[in-house]
Image (tube, grey):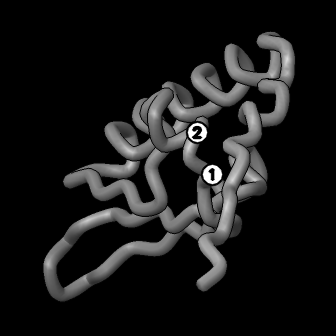
Amino acid sequence: MQQAHPGWLIFHNSETDIWNAYRRTFPDKREIGAGIRLLIRADSAERLEGKLTAQTEIQAALAALPAPGPLPGIPRTFLRS
C-alpha cells in the first residue's frame, strides 16, 4: 500500500488495531477546501486503501484545474500624524 500511495506514511497501530495514513506534505488552503486530509484513519487496510484512493482522485481533479491567480491587492495607507 505504501508503494501505491507514495505521498503518504502508512502505519498500523497494533494496540488499537487502527490503520493510519499521514500525508508527507501539509495540504494548502485550496487542497483542504477540496477535501484533502492530513491524517486518515480506518479500521482495516482495505478501508484505508479506499480512502487513500479517494484522496488521489481529489488531487488529480485539482491538478486538472487551472492554478489560481494571485489575490487582488488591497491598497493600504498609513496615517501620518
Quick one: 32 or 40, which is closer to the camera?
A: 32
Q: In the picture shown, does residue 34 fall above or below 41?
A: above
How crowded pointer 2 is (Cα within 10 Å; few <14, some 14-19, many 20+) is rated as: some
C-alpha separation, residue under disc 1 versus residue under disc 2:
5 Å
Q: Cβ–Cβ below 8 Å for labels 1 and 2?
A: yes
Q: Quadrant of residue 71?
A: top right
Rendered image: mark on residue 31: 2
Crowding near the residue tagged with mark 1, few <14, some 14–19, many ≥20 C-alpha atoms within 10 Å: few
Q: Is residue 55 above or below residue 77?
A: above
Compared to residue 76, the image places residue 60 above or below, namely above
Residue at position x 27%, y 52% in the image: 42
Q: Residue at x 48, y 73 (%)?
A: 11
Could you say where residue 36 lies in the image, as x and y percent from the top left?
50, 40
Residue 66 falls left or right of residue 4: right
Name the secondary structure under disc 1: loop
Q: Residue furthest front?
A: 81
Residue under the image location 62 percent in, 20 percent down: 57
- Which residue occupies the foreground of this view, 31 or 22? 31
Regarding mark 2 in the picture, which secondary structure is present there? helix
* Disc marking residue 65: none
Q: Is residue 8 left or right of residue 46?
A: right
The quarter of the picture where residue 81 lies is: bottom right
**Amino acid type assigned to the residue bearing label 1 in the image:** Asp
**Label 2 sits on what residue type?**
Glu
Instruction: Residue under label 1, please give it.
Output: 28
Q: Residue at point 30% right, 57% down?
A: 41
